[in-house]
Image (cartoon, rainbow, N blue to C red):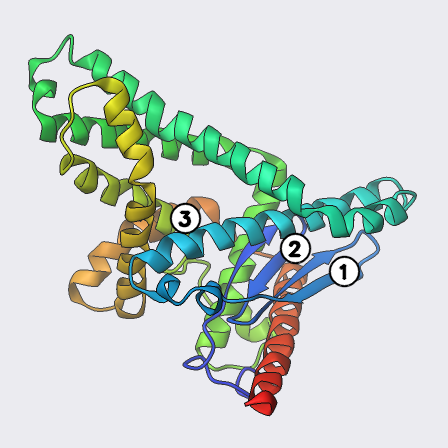
């Protein structure tokens, strides 16, 4: 399916995520994840995605929608990552557990929710509690840290260092480098769609692996926005400060989402070029040049998602 065949990029905003030996692509009404099997075939799962604003209208409001999108993206990302892991396991054991994996498909909601909870706890401990404890410890040695603005600036810088160290550490793992290649493939294919070009490997190959709406950039926005927001809430007790920072996560993610949403389409102009530059620079670590086979997987995922999205739109139009 050509990129211009049914809808234009102005009509459909697409995004995605790299998974194990594959790519997940998301459209407004659907998603599809494509995984390359050991025999060269491509395993696909695709499903409709219900917009959260259809359940509760206020979720579509600015700032609120950012936290909702983040939660839904995390849930969907873990589901598709779990699917890709299942496919990889099927290849590893020669397909002996394929039926067992298929049987578990319907009961995967609880494990994904548990994974989300575990990831949230680790993130809070590593990127909120640990930097806050270190900064509080530094107050005993440097009087300047007693200043609330300086305190939050130091705390934020430690948080950014932890984040960069984590990215650099995992980037050295061979399996993660493969995921980063698929991450690059996802970005190239999204750029091809947004340029209204036919979804082919040749067209995608010419595109950059960097994209202003990347999740990596979003996390960096979160790090910076958190410094500003935390500075506005002055408390004294350690645990009060910690709890306030956990409570403020929805606000920070919402503001970060609005900022990246505002800057992404204007990333080539003036002030916004400087806003997106740090995120794009960080993507030079989290994305790698993909092979043609990897581009083909990303293209396959996007075509499947667009096809299902178009079917959903036709259903809604018929019902109207």
Disc 2 marks which residue?
Answer: 22
Mark seen at residue 43: 1
Determine the residue positioned at 76% across, 46% down.
86
Could you tell me which quadrant the C terminus lies in? bottom right
Vertical arrangement, residue 117 with respect to residue 140, above or below: below
Question: Which residue is most to the front?
Answer: 56
Neighbour tally class for label 3: few under 14, some 14-19, many 20 plus, Cα within 10 Å: some
100 with respect to 214 (left or right): right
The secondary element bearing badge 1 is classed as strand
48 with respect to 190 (left or right): right
- Distance between the alpha carbons at the discs numbered 2 and 3: 18 Å
Tell which of 46 and 39 is nearer to you.
Answer: 46
Neighbour tally class for label 1: few under 14, some 14-19, many 20 plus, Cα within 10 Å: some
Cβ atoms under marks 1 and 2 closer than 8 Å: yes
The secondary element bearing badge 3 is classed as helix
Neighbour tally class for label 2: few under 14, some 14-19, many 20 plus, Cα within 10 Å: many
Tell which of 171 and 162 is nearer to you.
Answer: 162
Cβ atoms under marks 2 and 3 closer than 8 Å: no
The secondary element bearing badge 2 is classed as strand
Determine the residue positioned at 84% across, 55% down.
39
Vertical arrangement, residue 151 with respect to residue 112, above or below: above
Tell which of 188 and 113 is nearer to you.
Answer: 113
Disc 3 marks which residue?
Answer: 216
Cβ atoms under marks 3 and 1 closer than 8 Å: no
- Distance between the alpha carbons at the discs numbered 1 and 2: 9 Å
39 with respect to 303 (left or right): right
Residue 32 shows up from this direction: yes
Mark seen at residue 185: none
Tell which of 132 and 283 is nearer to you.
Answer: 132
Determine the residue positioned at 50% across, 67% down.
51
């Amino acid at each position: 399916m050509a990129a211009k065949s049914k809808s234009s990029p102005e009509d459909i905003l697409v995004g995605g995520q790299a998974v194990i030996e594959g790519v997940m692509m998301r459209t407004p009404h659907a998603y599809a994840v494509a995984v390359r099997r050991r025999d060269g075939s491509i395993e696909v799962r695709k499903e409709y995605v219900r917009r959260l604003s259809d359940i509760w209208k206020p979720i579509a409001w600015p700032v609120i929608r950012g936290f909702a999108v983040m939660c839904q993206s995390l849930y969907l990302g873990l589901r598709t990552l779990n699917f890709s892991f299942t496919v990889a396991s099927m290849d590893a054991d020669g397909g002996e557990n394929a039926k067992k994996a298929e049987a578990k498909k319907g009961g995967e909601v609880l494990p994904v929710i548990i994974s989300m909870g575990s990831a949230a706890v680790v993130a809070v401990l590593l990127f909120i509690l640990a930097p806050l404890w270190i900064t509080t410890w530094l107050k005993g040695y440097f009087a300047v840290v007693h200043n609330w603005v300086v305190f939050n600036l130091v705390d934020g810088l430690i948080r950014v260092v932890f984040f960069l160290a984590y990215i650099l550490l995992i980037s050295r793992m061979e399996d993660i480098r493969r995921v980063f290649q698929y991450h690059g493939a996802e970005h190239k294919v999204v750029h091809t769609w947004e340029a209204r070009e036919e979804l082919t490997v040749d067209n995608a190959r010419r595109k950059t692996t960097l994209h202003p709406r990347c999740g990596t950039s979003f996390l960096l926005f979160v790090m910076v926005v958190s410094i500003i927001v935390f500075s506005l809430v002055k408390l004294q007790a350690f645990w009060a400060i910690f709890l306030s920072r956990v409570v403020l996560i929805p606000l920070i993610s919402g503001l970060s989402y609005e900022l990246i949403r505002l800057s992404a389409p204007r990333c080539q102009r003036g002030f916004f070029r400087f806003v997106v530059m740090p995120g794009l620079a960080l993507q030079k670590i989290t994305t790698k040049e993909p092979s043609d086979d990897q581009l083909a997987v990303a293209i396959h995922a996007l075509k499947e998602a667009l096809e299902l999205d178009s079917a959903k739109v036709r259903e809604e139009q018929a019902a109207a």
